[in-house]
Image: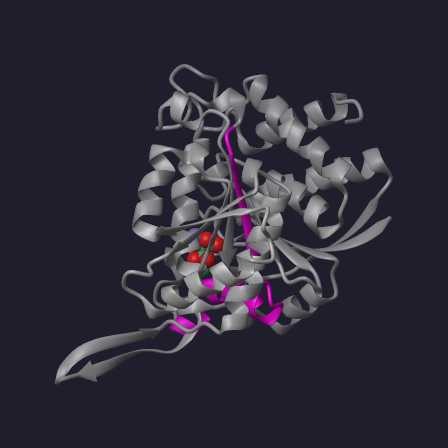
Amino acid sequence: MKKQIALLAGDGIGPDIMKEAVRVLEAIGERFGHSFSFTPAAVGGAGYDVYGTPLPEETLKACKDSDAILFGAVGGPKWDSVPKELRPEQGILGLRKELNLFANLRPVNVYDALVSASTLKEEVIRNVDVLIVRELTGGIYFGTPSERREINGEEGVVDTLVYKRSEMERIIRIGFESALLRSKKVTSVDKANVLESSRMWREVAEEVSKDFPEVELEHMLVDNAAMQLVRSPRSFDVIVTENLFGDILSDEASMISGSLGLLPSASLSGKGPGLFEPIHGSAPDIAGLGQANPLAAIASVAMLLKYGFEWEEEAQVVDQAIAEALATGARTSDIAEGGEQVFSTSAMTNAVLKALKASTAV
Ligand code: IPM
Ligand code: MN
């Protein structure tokens, strides 16, 4: 089957990891008889440098015309002084909004080979399997006004948190639907002791839960959730939460798996192409040095195959090849422990490709 994939490498290590992700896609194509046509497009600082905007029209069109979007990372100190509406981050935020990618799935798993690589104790993190379902197109990220203004004669600032009930409902529903396929528990995270938006969120979670009698619903305040995530991460199954809380908790949760360089994500709209990206940033300090861990991008390829194309077997082959590469000792610098050989970005991908080619059907 032929699929069109938009490749938005972006900034920093974005191009480094994108190259590796494409190698894995090509290997999958070869193995399963699929062919891909790739459309590279500029985004973020790279878009700004060439077209004067982080989300050029051509890029948006390439995304809309594709079956799926593979995204690298955006941002870096180089663009610190550009006007806020032209910042590289507006590239990804604009895409999420334009393509209505409201549902962000961020799975957090621990690879057996890496249980000792985490800063957390092995007995705490072994067999962790959490899915963070993050709302992605609303909340304080997108509310207006968002501006500096004078407040009682002093310099001040306003950001605005806005949600419609329907926006809460659709993402919470995805949380429950995901839980149905897993351990049937939803933790809805909010700050209902302080925020009105969170009190409404809690109400909506209660309502939606009536449609899922077999799924257990618990409410948790976000400060407590941040604590419980490192205290007893195995007590979570699906976490569903609003945009900003999900952003923060998912970075925290990545350390359960050992490195920010391991975690993928899928951003879905229900119709139209999904966007698949590592949750890590652009790491400008190591851009182009061949040090970046490509596994989050490669795991994002697996999510693309699974959620974008509904190719379960292809996705499993990629996920297993990652686990296998780690089991054979492949380590980039972010996950290497004292004395372990450090693999470059491409050497890590080579290890994944070797495992992928050697694997038999799942
Ligand atoms: C993420 C990133 C983005 C976010 C940035 C780059 C705008 O941190 O995808 O988690 O805050 O959503
Ligand atoms: Mn983030």
Is 184 or 289 nearer to us in this picture? 184
Residue 306: quarter of image? top right
Q: Residue at x 17, y 78 (%)?
A: 155
> Along the horizontal axis of the image, is 31 left or right of 273?
right
Residue 71 seen in the figure: no
Residue 346: quarter of image? top right
Expressed as whole percent of the image width and height from the top left, the position of residue 315 reads 71, 38
Expressed as whole percent of the image width and height from the top left, the position of residue 191 reads 33, 59
> Along the horizontal axis of the image, is 61 left or right of 32?
left
Which quarter is ligand 1 in?
Answer: bottom left
Expressed as whole percent of the image width and height from the top left, the position of residue 96 reads 56, 64
Q: Is residue 150 magenta?
A: no
Q: Residue at x 56, y 23 (%)?
A: 326
Q: Residue at x 59, y 63 (%)?
A: 101
Q: Is residue 149 above or below residue 265?
A: below
Q: How many marks?
A: 0
Is 285 or 90 nearer to us in this picture? 90
Residue 64: quarter of image? bottom right
Expressed as whole percent of the image width and height from the top left, the position of residue 255 reads 40, 36
Name of the residue lying farthest toward the top: 339
Please give the range of residues in magenta. Answer: 84-110
